[in-house]
Amino acid sequence: MILALDSSALALLINPDARAPDDPDTGEPVTNARERVVGLIAGMSAADTLIVPTPVLAELLVRAGKGGPAVLEQLQGQARVRLCPFDVRAAIEVALMTQEALESGDKRGGSGQPWQKVKYDRQIIAVARVAAAKRLYSDDRGLAAFARLVGMDVVSTWELPVPEGTDNLFTSAGLPPDGQPSRPTE
């Protein structure tokens, strides 16, 4: 399967200090966010390919600052990661999506986001569609809604399972995973 990452998921994968997204159910940062994304990658099959649309790469490189070249080298060195450009086919895809939205009377296609963000999100989705991605990993609600609108499966960090063996509040304090102190054996 071909899977696409947006900048929020990719940042968690590459930067251990990346800010975790907020869980929409609790309003609190997602626990073990980085571990969830690392677990996703570790659980990929040999047949899976991870694509990074170049508009996503641009966002990531801005966040990486001086570390950008190392990030780019790391991504390019991964056998199952492909950097996919916004090319002529993606431009045609964006044009078709935008024409459809204009014909419906809403150039933003139902999004409440600023026009510049809508255009950027369409570029990301267009690159993913041209690369035949079936699933997008994203914590950006606007991008996720648009991806769903065009038929893509979307998974957010808070929906990913916490890999087994990941420390939680209890285990990091030396307690059993359920937080209950062990009873001495007699």
Image (cartoon, helix red, strand yellow):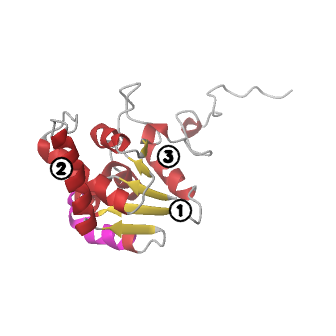
Find out whether residue 65 is within the magenta segment: yes
Q: CA distance from mark 1 to mark 3?
A: 17 Å
The span from disc 2 to disc 3 (Cα, nearest Å) is 29 Å
The nearer-to-camera label among 2 and 1 is: 2
Circle 3 residue: 36
Instruction: Tell me what residue is drawn at x 13 percent, y 47 percent.
Output: 116
Q: Nearer the viewer, residue 21 or 146?
A: 146
Image vertical order of residue 159 relative to residue 11, above or below: above
Q: Which residue is mark 1?
A: 48
SS state under label 2: helix
Most distant residue in the right direction = 186
Q: Which residues are magenta?
A: 61-74
Position in image of residue 94 (x %, y %): 23, 55
Q: Is residue 11 magenta?
A: no
- In the displayed structure, does residue 114 sit left or right of residue 135? left
Q: Dots 1 and 3: beta carbons under 8 Å?
A: no
**Where's residue 42, x and y in %?**
55, 57
Residue in the foreground of this view, choosing between 63 and 135: 135
What amino acid does circle 1 point to?
Answer: Asp
**Crowd band around label 2 with a 10 angstrom C-alpha radius: few (<14), some (14–19), many (20+):** some
* Residue located beneath label 2 in the image: 119
